[in-house]
Every structure is written in structure tokens, then in C-alpha cells.
Image (cartoon, helix red, strand yellow):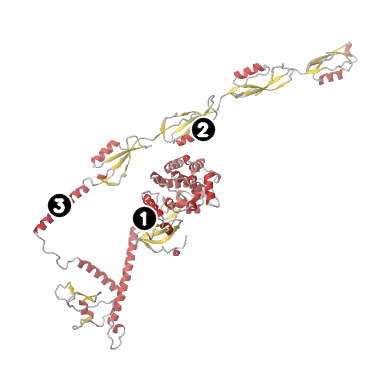
Amino acid sequence: MTENRTDPRIGTTLDGRYFLEARIADGGMSTVYRASDTRLHRTVAVKVLHAHMASDPAVLERFTAEAIISAGLDHANIVKILDHHVSPDAAYLVMEYVRGLNLRQLLDERGRFTPRQTLAMLRAICTGLAVAHQEGIVHRDMKPANVLISDEASVKVADFGLARAASAHTNATSVFGTAAYISPELAVGDPADERSDIYAVGIMAYELLTGRQPFSSESVYGLAFKHINNPVPAPSELVPGLSPELDELVAYCTDKDPENRPQNASFLLSDIQQMLATLGKEQLDLGSETLGMVSDLVPAITSAHTTVHDRLAQAQQKRDALAESAADAMTETMEEQVRTLNPSAGGSAPVGTAPQKNPDATEVISASADTTIINSPSGNPDVDHTTVLHKGSDHTSVMPSGLGSRNSASSPSTGELAAVPSRRPMSARRARKNAKATEVAWRKNAQIPTHQLAPKMPARRKWLIGVLLSMLAALLAAVGFYFGMGPGAPFTVPQLTNVASAQAVSQLRDAGVEARTTEVFDEKIERGLVVGSEPAAGETIRRFQGLDLNVSKGPELFAVPNLNGRSQQDAEKDLKTAQLVVGKVTQKYSEEVAKDAVISHTPGPEEMVRRDSKISLVISKGPAPVDVPNIVGETVSDANAALETAGLKGSEDSKAYSRSIPAGAVISQKPAKGQAERGSTVGYVVSLGPKMIEVPNVQGKQLREARATLESLGFKVQVDEFLGGFFGTVRSQTPAGGTAAEGSTIKLVVV
């Protein structure tokens, strides 16, 4: 903060009322001071526009309009506007003074917040912001520096509408002054609405959870570019263990498309309250071992609170000090007069020199034709009276004559005051006491008329005055009855919650109070019963004012959207938009509905249910699997028919020779057994029959050599011995040549 002594406004008073004590903050548009309201004896904050801003008529016009709008926002979570002033010398707003820290200072001090602390802070911010959004007011400059946390544990949103007032005078660079929280639509120059504030709150939520802003850049333009194009990362990437619901909350608020964000702060507030109610203690208090609890966010008290009586006492002390200073000055003046009139008391005048007169001293001048004598009860002008004489054109001397009898003498010929020795100088304490006594006596004597100003009143006038007084008495009696027992009498609003609407209206009518009813939705109170009143129970009104009763229409009902055929992810988004939640999810095979799509849901489409009702979903697992038939050994046509009957498709993968499977039949299949998804394909290999091999001539060879040759070619060998096969020589073979099927038998005759 800049030193106060460098600010020429410190120590000055605005409009004779707001004494500026210290500078609180500086901005591109204004400077904020802590000030004392000398009229109501309270501490306030004064925001003074810079001179170059206050000289622009367009800025002043919008500044005034926004001050009027902001002054209408009366809520505990919004900084109150107390006064407003625009003149050629200065333009300023007077606001309530919040002792404590802003959220930026608290973040810099703590680093980051726990999820519970974050949601509690966001709940307070959105509560105040929702009041503004309901009035159609967009903040446009939501950031941690504009959120104040008092040492009494209250959270208040400040600076409503001032960004809009500044836009008439700022260039593009100034608009990006808080680019870290700017929404994409505002960055590209589109109009801002409530959803722009929601985007900024989402960025604040990310910063509270992680201690860092989601984007960084060396220039505000680069930062704005990232807000336009880059998605905000999930907070859990920096803080592992954060609940997925918190990631979803940040993503929901910072969606690039305003249509996909909460439409205003009331919607976001509902989501925050639901998260506080549904998240577990472990999720909400993640990191609380080092970051503490919600109560640890309250700033420490830096100075003692003062009551109204304390401030009045301080003001009285200042007035007494000023009065005492004035009395001391009066005493010094009187002593100086005595020394002037009596030179012997403080020194002697030169011989032959007449005593010098103090031009400011009081003179006693003898009465003459030009003297007016007032307040002389005895008729003697020399007894305890004051003489007043115009000396010259603009000089008047005033002095009580009686004073001359005690410490001065009057010359009978000249009437001039002759100095005589004074007994002793009057003390400061005696002077103050005499001054107070003189003031009391003056007030008392001022009430006594000095002479009759008019002749005696005629009888007719007395009669007329009597009639008027009678009429006035009757009027006062009527007014007294009106405000005492009639329509203007005070009335304390009773507790009417859960009372039937007709009964409450009748009860108020009997008491002389008109009741106006308005139907509202309520989740807890039954239809037809009173939810509450405005003004609320316990407040005092005048009977003629009447009051408004809010009568329950029962819980607000929401239509269940048609989710059939929607993917599970899209169905969950549709339910969230419809203020509903996903209930039990089951999976089921379906021949008609694609895999991962909704087959059905309960309650069904267009049924009316309460807010946050759970909708059960049945999700498709796709078609049910079928048994794979065995087609090995079947002809191709028979195999395809069997697969089609089972709900599958057949496909010839290849062909191969087979000793056991005849040509044109299936040798193998894949899958060979088990189950497969309906409509899937089963591949198979078709047999070419046995392979034909040329039969070698082994006649004349020894049996062992002939056998080896034939078996190596895949033939089987059958041996018939002739005459005992003594020599072991092949005499003949069948077949003796040509070709034969692989695996067929060659018959040998051995001698």
C-alpha cells in the first residue's frame, strides 16, 4: 500500500462529513479510503473516482446509475452502499467498512483451501450473487479481490456494477485488467450476462482448490486467448484425491459455451449445497490436517470493536478538548487586556504618554442620544446593564457597566475607562467555569421576553383560536386513534408457517390486516399451507400496510426426459439438466438396442417427479451370445446352413488336403465350440481330399530299403513273404507304379 503521507486527501473531509483517515486500496478507476462519518459517528469505506474519470460526463452518468442500482441490493453477503456524491470537486461512493481481508489476501496467505472450505466460500459468494442476478444485475468483475471476509465471519461481494461504469472510459487494455477470470464471450467482445459471472466463479473455484490459476501468460491478451480456446484442466490433476464431483463442478462452470453453464448463481448455489450434503467427510476435509477447517478462514481481529456509545463519547471528548482550548485562549486574551489597561501590573507606560487601547478590547461608553439601553429593570441605566453605541460607521463597543464598579472607574466628564489595579488574573479553570455559567444564564434569560410585541388579543380572535384548537385536538385524537387502535396501529406479524392458507387469511383479517397470497413451490410443506410471510414473523408493521403470504404449491415437479436409445453418458447429462439424478443402473442383452444405449428407464418418459429424484436406467449389452455348432465333416452348403440357423455367418478361410475328410467337406472351424455374439462370423477350412503321390518302383531292393522309401512318402507298407522271405528281396509290389493317395497301402512280396 502506498504511504498515506503521499496522498493529499488523507486528513481531509469530504462535504464536511467524511474524514479520510487512511488509504485502503488503489485501482485503475478509483482509490478506496477508510473514513469516519462525523455525522453518524461510524467507520465507512469511501471509493473516490480518479480525477480523469470524474471529468467524463458519460462515466459520471453511469457511475450514478450503478450507485442507485447497487444501493438497492440489501443482503448480508453484499457490501452495502450508504451514500453517493457527484460534484465538480469529487465523485465518490460511501460503503460499509468491512474489517478483515479480501479473498486474494487470504489465498496468498493460505495457499489453497480444502474442499469443505472451498464449497463454504462459494456458497456465501453465490448467495450474494444470486440476489443480484435476480434483480438483473451482472457483476462483470468477479475475482478474489472483490470478495471480503470480515473478522466477524461474514463474506461479502463488493464492487457491483463498477466494471460496467468504467467501460465507458477504458480502452481494450483496461478491459483485460482481470483477464485471469474473464469469460470467453466477454474476451471476444460479446455482451456479458449472468453466465459470465458463473465462469469467473468457476475459475475462482479452481484457484481455491489448487492454489493456482488454470492459465498463465506473459500478456493479458495471451491469457484471454487461452480462456477462449483452452479447456480448464481438472483440479485433481494438481491435487490428487479430489472428488470427481469437484472436477465436474469446475468443468460445468467453465464450459466455453454459456448455454452449457449454470444459467445464474441460484442454479449454481443449488449444486453447491447438494455437494456439501452428499460428499463424504473424507472427501470434504481432504488436506484439513494442514489447511484446517472453515472456522480457520476467519481473519484475526486486529483492533477492538467500538460501540455507538464509545464513538459518541470519543466525539464528546473532542468537543470538550476544543472548548477547553477556546477557554484557555479566552483567559490569555483577558489577561492581555488587563496588562494593557493596567500598565503597573506588567510594566509602566512612558511618562506623558496616554495608555494605548487594544483595538479588540471592550469599551464602556457613557449613554448619549445615540445609546440604546436594554435590560434595565430598575430604570437606572447605571445598574447592571449593557450599553451599545455605534462608534463610527462600523464599530460597536459592548461592555457591562457594572464592571466599572469592581475593577475600573468611569470619568464623569468624558466617560472614558480609567485603569485601576486589578486584584489578580483569572485562572484558566475559573474562566472555563465562568464561561459555562454565562452560557447557562444566557440560555435561561433568552427565553424571557423583554417587552410586549403586540396589543391585547380581541375576544373574536380568542374565539377563533379556541375553535382552531378544538379542531386540532379532534384531529390529534383521530390521529391518535388511527395510529393507536385503528389501521395505523402497530401489528406484530405472527408465526403462520404450516397454517392453512384460508385460516391464516381469516386470522389476519380479524386483526385488521390485509393478506395477499402468492403460491410458491416447497419441498417440505404440504400444498395449501403457509410457507412464510413477508415481512417475516416477529417483525412489526402498520395494519394498513398488509403483508404477503407465501402458500405452498407442494414440491416442484419436473418431467422425466425420454432417454430411450440415448447413450448412458448423454442420458446422465439430460437428467442433470432436468434437475434429476441417475439411480440404479442395470445391463441387459438386447437384439434391437445398440450396445451401451438406454433400453428403458423408470420412471418413464414425461412422468412428473420431484427435484433430484433418482431415475433407474437399463443399459443394453448388445445382442445375446449364441452356441457355435460343430460343422467339421459337413459339406460347405450344410455347414453354412447350420451356422445361419444358429444366428451366425460362415466364411471359408482356406482349403487343405485331408486323408480322413473327403473333398468338399469341412476339415476345421474357428471358433470350434462355445458361444459367440449373434451375427458374428465362423471361419472354416474346406478339404481337398487326400494328396496323390507317385508310387516309386522298389522291386529288387531289400525290404528294409523299400519300406523306408515308401513310408517316407506317406505310404503304408504290407509285406507278404514268399518261401519264408529268406533273402529279404522285394520280388513284386502292388501297385507297381502310377499314383496313389497319400496314406494308402503298398503291398510288397518278399523272397
Residue 608: x, y in percent? 41, 31
- Type of amino acid at the residue the image marks with label 2: Gln
Q: Nearer the viewer, mark 3 or mark 1?
A: 1
Instruction: Tell me what residue is drawn at x 11 percent, y 58 percent.
Output: 461
- Decide which of tag 2 and tag 3 comes sooner along the chain: 3
Q: Residue furthest top?
A: 723
Question: Which residue lies under the disc numbered 3?
Answer: 471
Tell me the mark number nearer the camera, choosing from 2 and 3: 3
Magenta span of residues? 465-474
Q: Residue 686 magenta-drawn?
A: no
Label 1: which secondary element: strand
- Furthest toward the right, the residue is 727
The answer to whether mark 3 and mark 1 are in CB contact below 8 A is no
Q: CA distance from mark 2 to mark 3?
A: 82 Å
Mark 2 surroundings within 10 Å by alpha-carbon count, few (fewer than 14), some (14 through 19), many (20 or more): many
Residue 471 belongs to magenta span: yes
Question: Residue 455 placed where, x, y %?
Answer: 11, 64
**Residue 155 visible:** no
The reply to whether callout 2 and callout 3 are in contact (CB within 8 Å) is no
Residue 684 appears left or right of 501: right
Q: Is residue 292 left or right of residue 469?
A: right
Quarter occupied by the C terminus: top right
